[in-house]
Amino acid sequence: MNALNATTAETVAAESEPATQETLNVELFGKQFGEQVVLGDISLSLPAGSFTVITGPSGCGKTTLIKIIAGLDQQFSGFTANRPLNTGIAFQEPRLIPWRTVRDNIKLVCQSGDEVDRLLAEMGLLDAADRFPGQISLGMARRAALARAFAVKPNLLLLDEPLVSLDEGNAERIRQQLLALWLQHGPTVMMVTHDLREALQLADRILILGGTPTRIQAQREYPQPQYDRDSAWIEQQLETLKIEVDACDSHQALHQCNREAQIEKA
Amino acid sequence: MQVNVSRSKPFLLSMGAFVALWWIAAISAADPVLVPSPWVVVQSFWQHLTQGELLQHLAITLLRVATAFIASLLIGAATGCAMGFSERTDRLLDPWLILFLNIPALVVMILCYVWIGLTEVAAILAVAINKVPNVAVIMREGTRTLDPNLAEMARAYRLGRWQRCRHLILPQLAPYLAASTRSGIALIWKIVLVVELLGRSDGMGFQLHLYFQLFEISSLLAYALAFILVMQMVEFLLLKPWEQQINRWRQS
């Protein structure tokens, strides 16, 4: 943890040996795109089996953070430790292979055919199983991408706004499936969303990102078990959470404006 | 393969127009030996097919085309992909590529025959050297258009090398492979004939040269007809179905 002081550290992307049942640690000193410092000091620990939701303004680097945690972006200063090997990830776009059918897309990451059929049925995709991703709706493609993320039986599940542009009925069904999967297999989940109700429904902990460069502005824990949360509880929590998010927003609104102007110039 | 009547109509019409034009030219020509009519050519073709050595020469030429084509496709694709994947290799090999792209085919043939001798190896090598740079250029472009998002997905899901090749890279390169194949066969056919004309004593090129010296234009055209027929068969029986197969996912 002392390493946090080393803000001027050169790019070190060290990784220790993966272990499944340990806390995943991410110590980020900074992440730059060219001259632009996108992420500042961010210290995260994701206990095994926890469900963390990140929220924050658009373009603040949430996707970048997800990629760093996934090990897909190694050009940063800092390190990650105890990242499990089998990671399920749902990107912001579905990223299905266009020339493989929905079934083959899922089969590619999961060898058992029965498992694929079960997931397809759960996601309501059986009818679309033999179609190509270009022939199904975006909502279906998102569900297929989630089915693929589930299919690897992940120890770490990274979800980057996976339910955007789904209609509420489908979104709710998938949230329930996500919860069921999480309760059953207990992967460590990290999810990005702008939907605070969704965050409250699912999260153990909500992190609010913001600032320039982006840091964790606030953090709230929700020990209440997920299946005990009803809409009354969610509405009640929403009040305080909204105030907190708004506070972070106004605090950084000016910075954000400046930064966007800079990005546009670049 | 289905033959769609309404779609084959324009094809038949334009083919008919071509034959008609040819016939008019043959009738109005001063010397029927120089411009034989389509019917004379068909008769000559039939005669060469049933009594002559057309099939034998056609087979030899086809074998040369296939060998040179496969060799140049393999070498060209490997070179092109290496150049597309690694910028360093690209910079190293680019001057060579430009050099070989611009050497006249005839020079390569003559040099191969002079240095290696009038052998089969020299003939096929000469053809392959002419084609490799073309394939390499097309495949390099193909490699550069590989989708980085899908590559990232493959990394996230720890897909193995073979899985990436089979499900991600090859399908993305398939249109470029198809383009190389089509332009490759068309080019190689033509070069093989010249190679045969210059230094072989069998094959279509040799026969064409022979009929040129004998001034037998109808036989010359009959051989050309055989040629075109085989090319069309390759197109309709191999290339088209293959392209349809690889583009199946595009039809929504």
Image (cartoon, coloured by chain):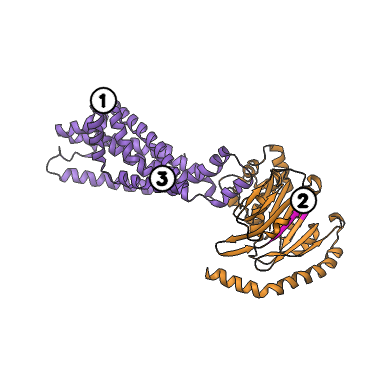
Q: Measured from the top left, where is residue B82 in percent x and y? A: 45, 43
From the image, state the color of chain B.
Answer: purple
User: Considering only vertical position in the picture, is B219 above or below A53?
Assistant: above
Q: Secondary structure at mark 1?
A: loop
Check the image and name the residue furthest to the left.
Answer: B30
For the residue carrying disc 3, how many other residues have a C-alpha within 10 Å: few (<14), some (14-19), or many (20+)? some
Res B179 label: 3
Start and end of the magenta stretch? A41-51
Q: Pinpoint the chain carrying mark 3.
A: B
Identify the residue shown where x is 44% and y is 47%: B88
Q: Is residue A226 magenta?
A: no
Mark 1 or 2: the one toward you: 2
Q: Measured from the top left, where is residue A174 in percent x and y? A: 74, 53
Res B182 label: none
User: Considering only vertical position in the picture, is A79 above or below B218?
Assistant: below
Q: Secondary structure at mark 2?
A: helix
Identify the residue shown where x is 73% and y is 56%: A2
Q: Is residue A49 magenta?
A: yes
Res B53 label: 1
Q: Is residue B141 left or right of residue B113?
A: right
From the image, state the color of chain A.
Answer: orange
Choose between B71 and A61: the one closer to the eye. Answer: A61
Res A177 label: 2
Residue kind at label 3, given as amino acid type: Ala
From where the camera sits, is residue B248 visible? yes
